[in-house]
Amino acid sequence: MSRNLLIVDDESSLCWVLGQFFASAGYRVDSAQALDEALDLMTTGRYDLVISDLRLSGTQSEEGLLLADFVRRFSPDTRVVLLTAFASQDLTEKARGLGVDLVLPKPQPLPALARHVSQLLTPEP
């Protein structure tokens, strides 16, 4: 059974790299570079997991949190991973409160990210 991932990052090269990496591991991958594009994909598709950058449109933006809140309300079973170069305890607590499953520092090594994704998508016994 193929798992569906949505990758959201304003850096097109990162979307491409993550998309290729997870597609080669057997996932079906869509990507978006902006919040509105991600929201459109969420309303028309079904995703098992969303990987999103925190900041999609500027140095102070937090669209990743808006997306996480939408995902939690629109698709409660979808897991959410937030990547950010601006991780802090406050951000992690805020993200968890919005339903983010995991906040990871950016950049994140691909094998480590793959392990996190696999763990989040493996049903607990």
Image (tube, grey):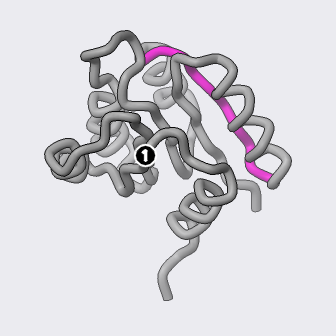
Q: Is residue 116 magenta?
A: no
Nearer the observer, 118 or 86: 86
Q: Quadrant of residue 71?
A: top left
Q: Is residue 19 left or right of residue 56?
A: right
Q: Is residue 103 left or right of residue 99?
A: right
- Residue 54 locus on image (x, y percent): 36, 30
Q: Is residue 29 magenta?
A: yes
- Residue 40 locus on image (x, y percent): 49, 19
Q: Which residues are magenta?
A: 26-35
Count all numbered tags in the image, as a single digit: 1
Q: Quadrant of residue 13?
A: top right
User: Which residue is tagged 1?
Assistant: 105
Q: Residues within 10 Å of mark 1 (few under 14, many from 20)?
A: some
- Residue 47 locus on image (x, y percent): 56, 44
Compared to 54, does 103 lie above or below?
A: below
- The residue depicted at 65 percent of the width and 27 percent of the height is 15
- The residue depicted at 76 percent of the width and 62 percent of the height is 1
Q: Amino acid at mark 1?
A: Pro
Q: Quadrant of residue 33?
A: top right
Q: Residue furthest bottom?
A: 125
- Residue 32 locus on image (x, y percent): 57, 21
Q: Give SS at disc 1.
A: strand
Q: Is residue 14 left or right of residue 16?
A: left
Nearer the observer, 85 or 118: 85
Compared to 1, does 91 lie above or below?
A: above
Compared to 113, does 41 lie above or below?
A: above
Q: Residue furthest right?
A: 24
- The residue depicted at 43 percent of the width and 14 percent of the height is 36
- The residue depicted at 77 percent of the width and 44 percent of the height is 21
